[in-house]
Amino acid sequence: MEKGFRERLAERQEKLGSFLCVGLDPLPEKMPERFKKNGKNADNIAMWMMWIVDQTFAYTSMYKPQRAHWEAIPGGTKALQRVINYIHKKYPDILVFLDCKRGDIDRTQQRYQIAHFEIDGVDGMNFSPYMGKDTMEFLVNKDHPERALVGLCYTSNKSAREVQDVRIDSREIGDHYWEFIARTILRWSQELGVTENAGLVMAAAYEYPKGSGKIYSDHLKSCRKIVGDKLWFLIPGVGTQGRFVHQTIKAGFAGWGSIAINSSSGIIFAEDPAAEAKKLHDEMVVIMRIEASVVFDKK
């Protein structure tokens, strides 16, 4: 039987000693001049992103293209598929996870399953759970239990707090909405028999209140209490969003393959992407190897 997403992720992370995920989210206006020979077209953008992959592969356990960044480019979806195939062929131990946040009724989700897994050829994708269990159930293909399905839970954008932090009970007690979602996605994954590779989008630790110097990671700790090590966390919000790697790992880690920490703009738009990827990778290695006794103290 083919190895599952999380097992492969764990193997790659343990080999590297870090959790880095590189987001492949191109913006044509930020493409380096040397890739603009024939303009800012999809082929040139694909070449640019393949160059990013070649620059960063030694430091990453996963690539995460954001599909909207490709859909907005004429011919971009075909270019994305070229990049995905390139990664799979040249770096077969590195997973490709599609950031697409799909969430619709049963037959539509089934179409997304075909579009992204069969045609795009990715190893995992995320979904929005707002429309109920259909959003997860109809992405499941029983012939491919190795695929990863990750639900939006506690996201890194500031305006998300207005919705995700609402208390379900009107008396301001009980779960926040995002905590309810974490419990619900765990239950769905168990009912559907896909828990092994299922996960949640959980924001990195961040400064709160802004300017206070205090680092907030309680959401990661709380979510680990809810789901244990059963679900893995896809963690956005480091790099240009200014989140905190050490606190993120300390609060969210539950073994290799339990977290993947994404950085997009801070790496792919850098003058030296390899150096930026290495910098973040090395920071994670230091946390894991030198400060392990601190990071994994769960008391």
Image: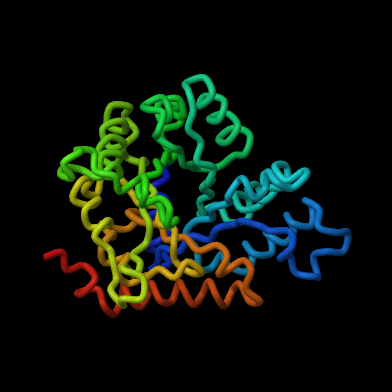
- Front one among 219 and 24: 219
What residue is rendered at 38% in x and 72% in y?
284
Foreground residue, 77 or 156? 156
**What is the quadrant of the N terminus in the image?**
top left
User: Which image quarter is the C terminus in?
Assistant: bottom left
Q: Quadrant of residue 203?
A: bottom left
Establish if 214 lies above or below 94.
below
For the view shown, which residue lies furthest in the top direction? 107
Residue at (36, 27) in percent of width and height? 133
**Residue at the far right in the pictured view:** 38
Determine the image quadrant of residue 212. bottom left
Residue 131 percent across, percent down from the top left = 41, 28
Can you see residue 142? Answer: no
Q: Please report the residue visible at 51 percent of the width from the left and 69 percent of the height from the top.
A: 240
* Mark count: 0
| Percent of width and height locating residue 127 | 45, 38
Q: Is residue 24 visible?
A: yes
Q: Is residue 12 left or right of residue 171?
A: right
Judge whether 79 appears above or below 34 on screen.
above
Whole-percent x and y of residue 94? 52, 55
Q: Nearer the viewer, residue 47 or 142?
A: 47
Left or right of 53, for residue 43: right
Display coloring: rainbow
Extreme residue toward the front, this view: 171
Q: Nearer the viewer, residue 260 or 59?
A: 260
Question: Seen in the image, is 262 located left or right of residue 45?
Answer: left
- Measured as percent of width and height from the top left, residue 87 is found at 61, 53
